[in-house]
Image: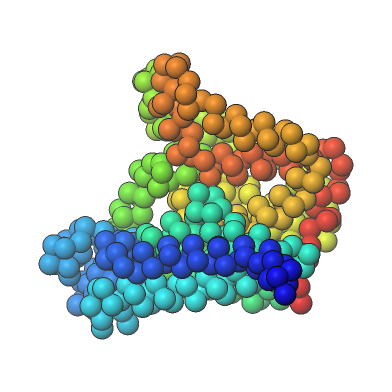
Amino acid sequence: MVSRVIAFAKRYGIYAILLLYAAGVVAVIYADPRLQWDFEAYYYGAMSWAQGVSPYGAEAVDRASDGASTWRFIYTPITVYAFLPFTALDLVAAKAVFLTLKLLALAGLVTLWYRMLSPRLPAWVLLAVCIFGFNAAIYADLRAGNITIFEQLVLWTGIWAYLQKKPYLAAAAIALAAVPKLALLPFLLLLIAPARRQWRAFGFGLSLFILLVAGPFIVRPELVGDFVSGFGREFHHRAPWAQSPLTFIGDITALQVVPQALNYPRVHVTVFALYAVMLLAVSWPMLRASFRQPPGLGHVIHFCFIYALLMPRFKDYSYILLILPAIVIATTVIRSLDARVIAVIVLALAAPIVSPLPYSRAVLGLLWSYYPLLLTLTVWLLYVREEKKTPGANHTQHPQARR
């Protein structure tokens, strides 16, 4: 009897620990009315729209919230309609309902991911990465009250449809996922990748996207200026909220050890362009070999990493996109790496903490602020390195989506 209890604890104890931790985190979010600040922008933006006022701009938020909130609505106008039902509730109740719906969406997303992974992978691995992966990206979204989890569920539904050879469903889902923030639109390019060019499905998805985004602007053209103004402000965010290569370059040039003559937007863009060229040059041989193969999950993984490493705007919760691709790459690459190398890397991460060198605290703080970005780049370069050693082996080992 005791042996059975021990065996049960060994097998399921890790699930209990992870789920209890996750439940505690969620309970804190439910209990703290100061969290989910992004939702306040959606809530008051929808309230302004219902009153016949533009949802954009500080004036609209200030009027709808009686000065209680300063967050601004920045998404495309049609997105407002998704938040109108919440305005029937007070803000606290609306936040609770919104968080509950996000948890349901998250459950659907994790279930979809698990179906797309190899059946040999223990479920607790996916659960642990979802809780802690990429500096707790999922927690960052839940805490901020953003819509990224909903977007990711729709996007990965489209990717699943792509893998199941349902191009029109894939196109529709990807287009819908891109409507609020526009940034996910490049995923439609998967439909016209070599070996399976679905131009009609691509055109359908692009047309649907344009209709949903441009339609409200045609009806109310005065919203264009407000939307562009609000959208432009998002590029001024820095770490830890923004985690893109472009912001990383900007923060490096802002350090005191760097000549301030380099701390200008034109310099940042130039350096970013050089970085993009070098990244694509290093990655191109593997990408070319991959796209000669029949389309599969490997193509999606490659696209996700290149997308994340090239996007000029990428927030901390945007790294939810890479949870599944990182797991697939890790289970492919780490098997062929010396465990001692991994141990040295882990130990080296702690070494600079006690460094007496000048500016070590500033540099270390900057590196840890960009930990998700640097982790993404490291995993990708390791993958490219392994592909060079065994050309064509890794991407063909990616599991296909379960039917």
Identify the residue at image location x=54%, y=31%.
350
Identify the residue at image location x=63%, y=47%.
306
The answer, for residue 160, to whether it is visible in the render is no
The front one of 227 and 325 is 325
Q: Is residue 303 left or right of residue 274?
A: right
Identify the residue at image location x=68%, y=35%.
343
Q: Position of residue 190 (x, y in %)?
A: 68, 61
Identify the residue at image location x=61%, y=40%.
377
Indicate whether 29 appears above or below 51.
Answer: above
Q: Is residue 27 left or right of residue 370?
A: left
Indicate whether 203 appears above or below 375.
Answer: below
Q: Position of residue 387 (x, y in %)?
A: 81, 42
Q: Is residue 400 left or right of residue 243?
A: right
How many marks overall? Answer: 0
The answer, for residue 363, to whether it is visible in the render is yes
Quadrant assignment for the N terminus: bottom right
Q: Position of residue 250 (x, y in %)?
A: 42, 33
Q: Position of residue 315 (x, y in %)?
A: 45, 51
The front one of 179 and 243 is 243
